Amino acid sequence: MATASHIHRRARRSRHSALSRSCSALPPGKTYQSILVKPLFITATGTGIGKTIVTTILAWQAKQAGKSVRALKPVISGFTEDTYDESDTALILRSLNLEETEDAINNISPWRYEAPLAPDMAAARENAVLDFEKLISFCKEAVEGPDDIVLIEGVGGLMVPLTETRTVLDWIKSLNCSSLLVSGSYLGTISHTLTAMETAEKYDLPIKAIIISESEESPVPVAETAAVIGRFLPGTPVLELPRLPDRLEQWRYAPGLLTKML
């Protein structure tokens, strides 16, 4: 398991997106007031889609609204001293304006693996096994704490293996919590998103909203993708996350749409 010692900060480049306008498939007059619940699990249709930028925007804007926030990325792979500065863990710490210490890193990401693979495969390369029950206990302890908002960011997509028998879906199910589903706007995303939603429905996982994070090579405008997904999922809010040029600490500059979830 990778440690956080001897971390050297490099230039801080943030992730790729910032939140803008929304597209909703909700009935007229329905609002987003009930989306941001405690806890809220941020999952996705795949890896590298935009979970962390969503988590950091939510964390930052909730703090600006006067809420106490705890954000977790309990399991992370591809974590080394060389990759730390742009890691999900580092970005979450910065969005919460927390000091980047060993203890702070452990409080957000206690299960850290060096290989950039699914957690079960990454752990195996270190002759380790992720303890699923300890993972659940860690998350529940955070949920039972005093913070107004608890955000739990998953790893990879909804069906990524954590152990030989457990997936991210099992993680969410064990916590009995609601989720945001982050998807992209790449070719194929509509099928991936509808499949993920079908899986969530099959296992009675409540999805509070879908966030379409614009992919680097989108075949159509993100609004068009959001509209199609919304047409197939009436009653589920579908929000757009357009791709913007990189800038430092993007969560500080994102429009305030997600604060409407509070």
Image (cartoon, rainbow, N blue to C red):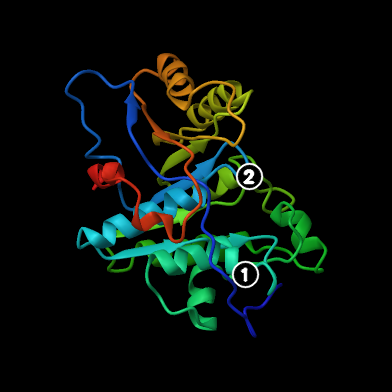
> Label 2 is placed on what type of residue?
Thr
The image shows residue 71, relative to residue 44, as above or below, that is: below
Viewer-proximal residue, 54 or 145? 54
Task: Point out residue 221 in the picture as x, y percentages from the top left corner.
Answer: 49, 23
Q: Give the tally of numbered discs.
A: 2
Q: Which mark is residue 84?
A: 1
Task: Point out residue 111 in the picture as x, y percentages from the top left corner.
Answer: 62, 67
Q: Which residue is mark 2?
A: 47
Residue at the image position 27 percent from the left and 68 percent from the top: 146
Task: Point out residue 140 in the picture as x, y percentages from the top left corner.
Answer: 43, 62
Viewer-proximal residue, 23 or 11? 11
Which of discs 2 and 1 lies nearer the camera? The answer is 1
The outermost residue toward the left is 29
Task: Determine which quarter of the picture holds residue 145.
Answer: bottom left
The outermost residue toward the bottom is 6
Is residue 142 shown to the viewer in this render? yes
* CA separation in Å, label 2 and label 1: 17 Å
Residue at the image position 59 percent from the left and 22 percent from the top: 219
Crowding at mark 2 (Cα within 10 Å: few <14, some 14-19, many 20+): some
Residue at the image position 65 percent from the left and 48 percent from the top: 166
Label 1 SS: helix
The image shows residue 145, relative to residue 228, as above or below, that is: below
From the viewer's perspective, is 189 left or right of 224? right
Instruction: Report if the CB atoms under discs 2 and 1 are less than 8 Å apart.
Output: no
Task: Determine which quarter of the picture holds residue 98.
Answer: bottom left
Viewer-proximal residue, 5 or 124? 5
> Label 1 is placed on what type of residue?
Tyr
Residue at the image position 47 percent from the left and 42 percent from the top: 244
Is residue 39 shown to the viewer in this render? no
